[in-house]
Amino acid sequence: MLRENYTAIVERSEELRGSFATEPYECGWAGEAIFFVRILERVGEIEGVKLYVQISPDGIRWCDEGTSLVLSGVEVSFCRVRHFGNWLRVAGTLPEGAGVRAIIALNLKG
Amino acid sequence: MREQARAILNADPRFSRFDPLPRLIYHDDFNRGLRGWVELIGNYEHSLDSMLPQFADMRPPMLSSGTHWDTGTHGAMQGTYSMKLATRARAGDISVSIKRVTWRHRGPIRLEAYFTFKPEASELQLSVNDVRAVGVLFDLQDEEYRWMPHWRYLNALEGEPVRSWQFKREREPFHDIGDRAETVSHFHLAPTGWEDVPESGQILCFNEVATKFNWYYLRMDVDLASRQITHLQCNDRIHDLTGVGPMMILAMPNLDCMLNVAFWVETDVDKRAFLYVDSVLLSGDW
């Protein structure tokens, strides 16, 4: 059997400001994941902002998994994560006055 | 269906719980992946901003093990995984997943599925009125018409229980998308224009805690030749079709022989609503 390989667009072009987190995504079937963050529009200074991968026992309560990605001047950033249980999301805080519109793709394999 | 064919289906636990027409067009058991079910997105041109805002965020489907904070993994009706649709935690938010194929014979089509729905178990309360509606639609086109049978279970509305089935034949306005006069869009899942299926009150087995799943059977038949809805059934209830009809639109460009099926879930409160689909079987008669 070929492995499953699925990409979910967990955030698409909504304006993100302040503290935010992507919607919970259930993916316990997968053994590995990559979050891709493609910046469509940026307002203010976002370079150096970290987005943190979070995991959850129930899809309701969250903790940092330890992996993060750093937004920079490039269009697409990513981070890899493995051994993450049943749910994934990314969370971050943009500085005062800053905002982004992004496509956040979660690629899963298992 | 011929007796021999039925006997073969009955011998296979994957199919014995279904009553398909002779041709199996697709059978989606979500233990084997999402199998072509994808988030619905509105039409756009040049920019995502040209999309009707209601279509901008229909949320991607997931493969769910039905895992909860209190009892762990519930699993699906058969096996571990079901397809899960999840709204945002915002009253009126809708999540829609669609599968797109085309038809090869203009005759009877039957959709069967096993499903359940629940609010997110974020409160220790019954929460029986938190999911507003779950529904299923066909999006079909022949040489003359695009027609869209819509059918939903209105569980609750603005906090009040409803527990009955509705259909929608009223068309929503079409809007031009972009500047090339090539694309239009209409938000056919708008809350307006829904009508009651006659005497369709039906209490489903919600159970008593948001983390307990009971699975329901759903069957919706349409006839591509006569453009009619011919059968609506949930569990033991076969609903009266008197006056029930689809949304009718003159045929549109680039949609020839379209045979799309979509499921959706809508939340009534600022809490995520979940639709779980264990399996889907689409069959036809030719």
Image (cartoon, rainbow, N blue to C red):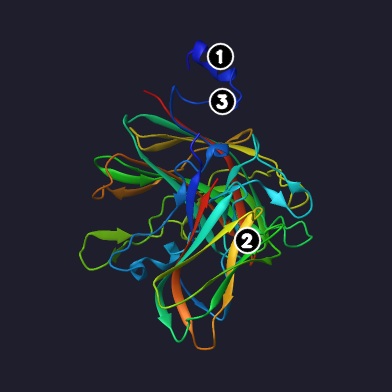
What's under tag 1, amino acid-wise?
A: Ala
Comes first in the chain, label 2 or label 3: 3
Q: Is residue B156 visible?
A: no
In the rendered image, residue B92, in percent from the top left (x then y), is placed at 56, 64
The residue pinned by badge 1 equals B7
Mark 2 and 1 residues: CB-CB less than 8 Å, in contact?
A: no
Q: Cα distance, mark 1 to mark 3?
A: 10 Å
Q: Cα distance, mark 2 to mark 1?
A: 42 Å
Q: Are marks 2 and 1 on the same chain?
A: yes
Residue A67: image quadrant is bottom right
The chain that hosts pointer 2 is: B
The residue pinned by badge 3 equals B15
Q: Residue at x 68, y 44 (%)?
A: B204
The front one of B132 and A87 is A87
In the rendered image, residue B208, in percent from the top left (x then y), is placed at 78, 49
In the rendered image, residue B76, in percent from the top left (x then y), is placed at 65, 40
What's under tag 3, amino acid-wise?
A: Phe
